[in-house]
Amino acid sequence: MKAAILEGLTNIDENESPLKIAETAVPVVKTGEILVKISACGVCHTEIDEIEGRTPPVKLPCILGHQIIGTVIDCGKEIKRFLPGTRVGIGWIHSTCGVCKYCLSGKENLCRNFQATGRDVQGGYAEFTTVAEEFAFAIPDIFTDSQAAPLLCAGAIGFRSLKLANLEDGLPVGLTGFGASAHLVMKMIRYCYPRSEVFVFARREEERRFARELGAVWAGDTSEDCPQKLQTIIDTTPAWRPVVEALKNLAPAGRLVINAIRKEDVNKDVLLQLDYAKHIWLEKEIKSVANITRKDIEDFLVLAGDMPLRPEVEEYPLSDANRALWELKKGKIRGAKVLKIS
């Protein structure tokens, strides 16, 4: 099969082609697994974190990608739900132990044996992949493959961020950064919390303009003061400065939710500028988003189908995976980027 393969860690600023397009063996399906022919795979900033070593693959070479849409073409023994011909999705959560206190209490995202698709096991920048049946998801028919792919992470992790935000309808909410995840969170807010006004902070005017098109009542630079204090802000950026800037815009008892697996070292020195009275006092909270659960994805896909929530997507052939990643790193984003595999 054809795949885009990461052979070594590197910095995308110095190496614009970290992935090698090559032929590799089709994975062998095992008991309890399904073999999926991949049609589309979303491109996520977490892949950049993997390539640059902030959350590196367990072993190299590695096939990245964790927003996978495809069709089941073969099954191992004991498969009951997803028979050949069924369209399925695969997200960041590839497997957990199933027996620890976190798994048994509905917090499998915190399992010490959590395995991530495209990091701990081979992912979706390829023509085929395998997954245990219980970690695959039915995809609503109303979505095309390219529309469905970003729902598996950008949408689902945005959904988890919104749950952790404890937003009440009518209270103002902020979004810092406006890429694949944030533009879906914006649509969810407008559907689930129709009386809440959305304020967006973004570095680039194109992002701010896009946010206003989708209904933001205000969109300014990351460093700007918001016209009013916000009860909740969701940060989807890879840098540190937006975190500090967001804290100053929180209302008393407000909550900042950081939707990121890792943060780059960019602006790390800004943490030294934290001012307790300005940024943290008055019982402000910071909440991180750690991985995702299967229930998050299942519940979100129901909501996405009901809305319906259709992502804005930019499509690339698998052979252009490096270009998609480079554009993502450089902030050339409008919605979500998706690789068309087959």
Image (cartoon, helix red, strand yellow):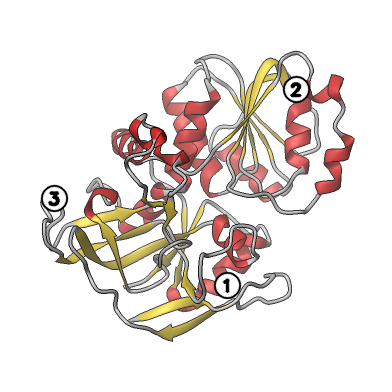
Residue 34 visible in the displayed image: yes
Residue 24 figure quarter: bottom left
The residue indicated by pointer 3 is 81
Residue in the picture at 47% in, 21% down:
193
Mark toward the start of the polypeptide (2 vs 3): 3
**Where residue 298 sits: x, y (%)?**
30, 39
Task: Please state the horizontal and vertical placement of residue 133, each as a whole percent of the image.
Answer: 22, 53
Near-viewer residue (206 or 229): 229
Q: CA distance from mark 1 to mark 3?
A: 37 Å
Q: Within 10 angstroms of label 2, few (less than 14), some, or many (20 or more) residues?
A: few
Residue 71's spot in the image, x, y percent?
Answer: 22, 63
1 vs 3, front mark? 3
* Residue at x 43%, y 49% (from the top left corner): 114
Q: Which quadrant of the structure image shows residue 286?
A: top right
Q: Earlier in the sequence, mark 2 or mark 1?
A: 2
Residue 138 visible, this angle: no
Hey, which quadrant is residue 1 in on the image?
bottom left
From the image, tell me which residue sits under label 2: 227
Residue 117 picture location, percent across and down: 41, 58
Amino acid on which disc 1 is placed: Arg
Dot 1 corresponds to which residue? 323
Separation of disc 2 and disc 1 at Cα? 37 Å
Q: SS for tag 1?
A: helix
Q: Residue flagged by tag 3: what amino acid is it?
A: Arg
Image quarter (top left, top right, bottom left or bottom right) of the C terminus = bottom left
Label 3 crowd bin: few (<14), some (14–19), many (20+), radius 10 Å = few
Q: Residue at x 71, y 53 (%)?
A: 264
Left or right of residue 301, residue 43 in this image:
right
Q: Residue furthest bottom?
A: 23
**In the drawing, does residue 105 fall left or right of residue 63?**
left
